[in-house]
Image: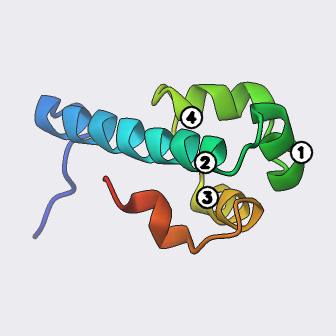
Amino acid sequence: MPTQPSRHDPRRIEQWAHHRQAVGGAIRRLRKERGLTQEQLADRSGVDRTVLIDVELGRQGLLYERLFDIAEALDLPVVDLFADA
């Protein structure tokens, strides 16, 4: 019987931290390329500004629905948020 990977596996924790950093960095870069402030992106996407700050810094992840909202607010396909992940 297959088992689920442990949430406490240090290798897995490190991988998720890398993914959060990569996606958050992409959001920040794309937001700046479009000349948007965090406040403007938060308003357009419906994601709270304080959450957006933590996401851009890689300290917090998002539900995938919010990633679609952010991609739409940036006027790009959601896959572009994962280019560096």
> What residue sits 36% from the left and 43% below the top?
22
Q: Check disc 3 and report the residue beneath it.
A: 67
Q: Earlier in the sequence, mark 2 or mark 3?
A: 2
Q: Earlier in the sequence, mark 2 or mark 1?
A: 2
Tags 1 and 4 touching, CB below 8 Å: no
Tags 2 and 3 touching, CB below 8 Å: no
Residue type of the residue flagged with mark 4: Val
Q: Earlier in the sequence, mark 3 or mark 1?
A: 1
Q: Check disc 2 and report the residue beneath it.
A: 33
Tags 3 and 1 touching, CB below 8 Å: no
> For this rendering, which residue is in front, 26 or 14?
26
Q: Check disc 1 and report the residue beneath it.
A: 43
Observer-side mark, 2 or 1, equals 2
Disc 3 and disc 4: Cα gap in Å? 10 Å
Observer-side mark, 3 or 1, equals 1
Residue type of the residue flagged with mark 3: Leu
Observer-side mark, 2 or 3, equals 2
Q: Check disc 4 and report the residue beneath it.
A: 55
Disc 1 and disc 4: Cα gap in Å? 15 Å
Disc 2 and disc 1: Cα gap in Å? 17 Å
Tags 2 and 1 touching, CB below 8 Å: no
Image-based side of 85 in relation to 1, left or right: right
